[in-house]
Image (cartoon, rainbow, N blue to C red):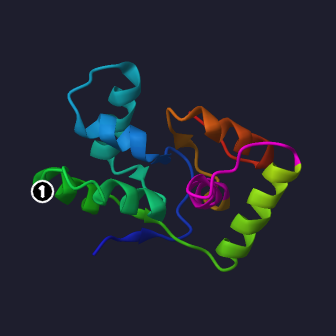
């Protein structure tokens, strides 16, 4: 079972997207990966729930890496989360922006907790107008 972080202070906490978690599990030594590793070791790295599902759905993920991912705390899904996610997507689409259905709940979880997201997916920049903080 993975713990959730309810009402955790946002200072120093970061959330990671699936692509960032794959880098964390790899052998990269770039600055962005160092940030992830430091946050992981400090216990300040969190996962939006959809990221946990995306990472664990990789059939080639080694079991020891899957175990590490399962250790990461999840951002709690707050009351009204799915309604806000739907309104977030509608906001993006109304403004002619991409709002991929898989990205919306990730962004909404980070917005709800006021925690920045580390990602290498440029499509998340569209969510900044709605309050998402990117690293």
Identify the residue at horizontal 35%, vertical 29% (top origin).
33
Q: Dot 1 corresponds to which residue? A: 63
Viewer-closest of 4 and 61 = 61
Rendered-image quadrant of the N terminus? bottom left
Identify the residue at horizontal 79%, vertical 65% (top origin).
87
Identify the residue at horizontal 41%, vertical 46% (top origin).
18
Judged from this view, the residue extending furthest toward the bottom is: 79
Determine if the magenta segment contains residue 96: yes
**Residue 52 percent across, percent down from the top left:** 37, 60
Rendered-image quadrant of the C terminus? top right
Determine if the magenta segment contains residue 118: no
**Residue 32 percent across, percent down from the top left:** 41, 26
Identify the residue at horizontal 83%, vertical 55% (top origin).
91
Say if 23 sits above or below 53 in the image.
Answer: above
**Residue 43 percent across, percent down from the top left:** 34, 51
**Highlighted range, magenta:** 95-111
**Residue 40 percent across, percent down from the top left:** 31, 45
Q: Give the class, few, some or many, for how many residues have Cα within 10 Å of label 1's Cα (few <14, many ≥20).
A: few
Judged from this view, the residue extending furthest toward the top is: 30
Q: Quadrant of residue 81?
A: bottom right
Task: Describe the element under mark 1 as helix, strand or loop.
Answer: helix
Q: Is residue 34 left or right of residue 87?
A: left
Q: Quadrant of residue 66?
A: bottom left
């Amino acid at each position: 079972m993975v713990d959730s972080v309810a009402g955790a202070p946002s200072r120093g906490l970061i959330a990671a997207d699936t692509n960032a978690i794959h880098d964390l599990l790899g052998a990269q030594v770039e600055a962005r990966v160092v940030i992830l590793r430091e946050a992981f070791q400090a216990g300040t790295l969190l996962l939006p729930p959809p990221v946990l599902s995306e990472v664990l759905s990789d059939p080639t993920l080694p079991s020891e890496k899957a175990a590490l991912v399962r250790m990461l705390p999840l951002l709690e899904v707050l009351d009204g989360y799915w309604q806000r996610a739907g309104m977030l997507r509608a906001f993006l689409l109304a403004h002619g922006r991409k709002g991929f259905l898989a990205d919306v709940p990730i962004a909404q979880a980070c917005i709800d907790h006021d925690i920045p997201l580390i990602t290498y997916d440029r499509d998340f920049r569209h969510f900044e107008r709605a309050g998402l903080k990117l690293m």
